[in-house]
Amino acid sequence: MAWYKDPLLFFLLLGAAIYGLSQWALAQDGEYEIVIGEQDLQRLNDQWSMQMRRPPSEQELAGLIEQFIKEEIYYREAMRLGLDANDTIVRRRMVQKLTFLTEDIATSAAFSEADLQAFYAENLDNYRLAERFSFKHRYFSVDRRANARSDAAEAVNDPEISGDPFMLQREYALRSEREVGDLFGRDFAAALTTLDPSEAWQGPLQSAYGWHTVLLINKAPAVVQPFADVRERVLNDAQQAARDAANKRYYEDLRSQYSIVRADADS
């Protein structure tokens, strides 16, 4: 049998023809075409300038373009091979990018001054300064003394008793209950709020470290900060609220288009 009549050769030629046609079709669809536009060049230029604090040279820009082409080729081949499937990191990153896109759209429109004023009025509690305390204290260590509480109680009436060395400050100004609690413990902070400002020492109060006598100098009442003082914070909060609302609406719209079927183990 002549070599050109061999069936195997026929199938090889047919397969090559089909492959060639498929590659040609892909090329016709732009599958193998990479377009580098002005926006791409500007983005590469801006990224380099931000990192290096100067614009790239022609040679450096050529290198950035070549790296962009390499990444694009690798990305397309990875997608073609389905390497993104069942990859938790890729999945989370794509979800994150979609979320960012939704948020960017939500905050693309500028907030007017009236919008910010309205948001401020609706959320006054977020701009309220909590009650704040200014005080001095003397510390009595349970590790250094047989009865630190008794010694602290005695020191309430004797300001000459200095107490023990303390790792933190001896005096604090305008600290909220939460801030005092972070430093001394919640029980100490709660007890401090029950005291009235006085020129006399008070206590003893127990903290996470031991016992203290306290000289409460001032108790500043809670107050709502004026809009002008917190305008930038209001703007940031309003933008975040818009992002959250946009994400919620977007998800609810998408969710309504899906039907969920549970594949129960017993079914």
Image (spheres, rainbow, N blue to C red):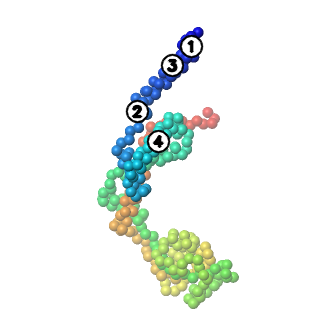
Structural crowding at the residue carrying mark 1, measured as other residues with C-alpha within 10 Å and reported as few (<14), some (14–19) or many (≥20): few
Name the residue that disc number 3 marks: 14
Of marks 2 and 3, the one in the foreground: 3
Q: CA distance from mark 2 to mark 4?
A: 17 Å
Q: CA distance from mark 3 to mark 4?
A: 32 Å
Residue 113 % position (x, y): 30, 59
**Tag of residue 85:** none
Q: Residue at x 42, y 67 (%)?
A: 128
Which is nearer the eye, 136 or 99? 99
Quick check: marks 2 and 4 in contact, CB under 8 Å?
no
Name the residue that disc number 1 marks: 3
Name the residue that disc number 2 marks: 30
The first of marks 2 and 1 along the sequence is 1
Identify residue type, mark 2.
Gly
Structural crowding at the residue carrying mark 2, measured as other residues with C-alpha within 10 Å and reported as few (<14), some (14–19) or many (≥20): few
Q: Residue at x 54, y 80 (%)?
A: 170
Identify residue type, mark 3.
Leu
**Tag of residue 70:** 4
Asked if 135 appears above or below 36 in the picture, the reply is below
Identify residue type, mark 1.
Trp
Q: CA distance from mark 3 to mark 1?
A: 16 Å
